[in-house]
Image (tube, rainbow, N blue to C red):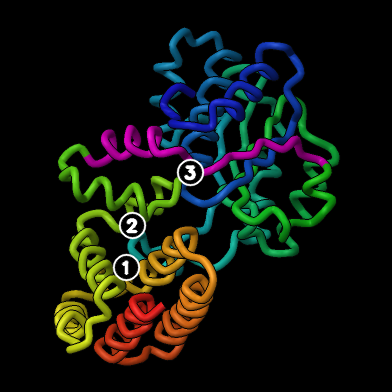
Amino acid sequence: MSRVRGNAAAQALFRSAMDGGTLHHAWLLTGPQGVGKSTFAREAATSLLSEAARDPGGARTRALIEAGSHPDFRVLERLPKDGKPDAELARSITISQVRSLNPLFATTPSLSSRRVILIDAVDALERSGANALLKNLEEPPAGTIFLLISHAPGRLLPTIRSRCRLLRFEPLDREDMAAALDALLPEATPDERDTLIRVGMGSPGRALRFAGLGLEKIDEALQRIARDGDRDNAERVRLMRALSLKAAQPRYEAFLDRVPTFLAEQAPYRSGQALRTALDAYDDARQIASSARALSLDAGGTVFELAGVVARLARG
């Protein structure tokens, strides 16, 4: 579990349960997306299975898990539609996927006395699938540990939550974010890394979505607009031209995500009417970005409008 950055308290709690012989049969790993829950769950599964199998160092166990061939480790996750690897993922984890575990539970673990089931994320379970899972949590098969990842635990059945031990993951601090991005993006420039740390908001996974898109240039333009107001629309027009091309679609999507968070970042440094201006701008930007996606609005017009919302900060 040493590969996981940050959240030392959560990692220590789980390790203490392992070492103390008080390991609960079901763990609910909660927290924002992209903070390392899935990485931790796979590392925890490796530790659980390697120690039970007396595999010092866990090399054999890790190799089997990474090859997808460990007989005592199973992952349930959303699958590509129509079975095509490059297809869009299905909206849900189906009840048939949950039921596919039943033959496994009818036998004893193969390599040790323990098996691990990872569900990533349990929020994506169909209602019927959640009810089927609940039966296994209520009467856990011998030696089985469930690791359930949840980005929104409030959406889960209360009966599922009540049968799990909670393991809460928090956003990473700047030092851990920097270390994570150094490992994940060793070729990033210092300016890009600093921008990704800021827009990642404590989530390396979120930061990676913006990597390689030149977001630091977009941020520089937003800073100028917020400071000077862009009275002649020159900055807005440059952004519109740069982000409305078909080839710029990934950068345009990043822009839609970035503008509301950029505005939210300004609020702590304001008070009075200036604060109200920033908060109103944030609300408007979220609505515009949401509508742009839902209604497939013109990219150029949307960029121009969002940049205009940022320009209000100069007046505030």
Sequence order check, earlier mark of 3 and 1: 3
Q: Which residue is mark 2?
A: 209
Name the residue type under label 1.
Ala
**In the rendered image, which quarter is residue 259 located in?**
bottom left
Percent position of residue 286, x then y = 48, 77
* Residue interval drawn in magenta: 163-185
**Marks 3 & 1, CB-CB < 8 Å contact:** no
Name the residue carrying label 1.
Answer: 254
Specify which label sits upstream in the sequence, 1 or 2: 2
Residue appearing at x 59%, y 47% in the figure:
31
Circle 1/circle 2 CB separation < 8 Å: yes
Residue 79 locus on image (x, y percent): 49, 59
Tell me, yes or no, whether the highlighted magenta stretch contains residue 227: no
Question: Of 19 and 213, which appears nearest the observer?
Answer: 213
Task: Give the number of the disc on residue 112.
Answer: none
The residue pinned by badge 3 equals 35
103 displayed left or right of 49: right
